[in-house]
Image: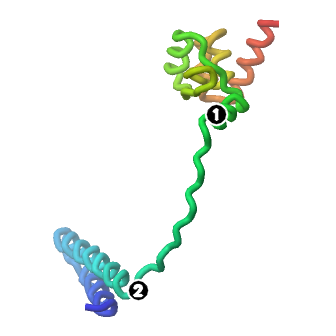
Amino acid sequence: MNTEDRARSLSSALRRLARAPGPIAVRNARRAVFSALRNLRAAVDVDYPAPRREMRSHRRRRSADAVDRDLIRDGWVSVPQASTLATLSSAGIKTRWADVAGRTLMAPGWAVTIAKCSPRELRRAARNPSERKTILMRIELSNA
């Protein structure tokens, strides 16, 4: 069967679906439509094959040092203590391993600062950036 024959069988299956009287007949007609669609797609693939794509050169992966430099540039710092790490993970803050000085765990600088000074407010700061700014300002003013 060629593409035109498959298209005709799809249209007849659609007409059968439109005339289906009950739920079981509708179910069977829907199956027939989907089967006809699959058959039509296979016939189109045979009659009109997709053009071959040329291979592109692979993108070079960034080195670990470049990724670590980006983390530091974006304000990530190393997590100093295990208790701070537990506070960060319980608040849902994402952390990453980095090879900055050996293998260290990195987290956003604002999160480490808030976790050290007021860990109870860390979850609220993680959800709301404007709240994060006010908490950081409060910490900064209390340290000054």
Residue type highlighted by circle 2: Tyr
Q: Quadrant of the rendered structure where residue 142 is?
A: top right
Question: Label 1: which residue?
Answer: 65
Q: Give the total of numbered labels.
A: 2
Q: Quadrant of the rendered structure where residue 42 is?
A: bottom left
Residue type highlighted by circle 1: Asp
Disc on the earlier residue, 2 or 1: 2
**Residue 135 position in % (x across, y down):** 71, 18
Residue 23 position (above or below residue 140): below
Mark-to-mark CA distance, 2 and 1: 48 Å
| Residue at point 31%, 78% (across, down) | 37
Question: Label 2: which residue?
Answer: 48
| Residue at point 52%, 72% (across, down) | 54
| Residue at point 71%, 32% (across, down) | 74
The circle on residue 108 is none
The residue lying furthest to the top in this view is 143
Mark 1, secondary structure of its residue: helix
The residue lying furthest to the left in this view is 24
Give neighbour class at mark 2: few <14, some 14-19, many 20+ (Cα, 10 Å). few
Q: Quadrant of the rendered structure where residue 105 is?
A: top right
Residue 47 horizontal side relative to residue 122, left or right: left
Give neighbour class at mark 1: few <14, some 14-19, many 20+ (Cα, 10 Å). few
Q: Quadrant of the N terminus?
A: bottom left
Residue 1 position (above or below residue 111): below
Mark 2 vs mark 1: in front:
1
Mark 2, secondary structure of its residue: loop
**Residue 120 position in % (x across, y down):** 58, 12
| Residue at point 53%, 16% (across, down) | 85
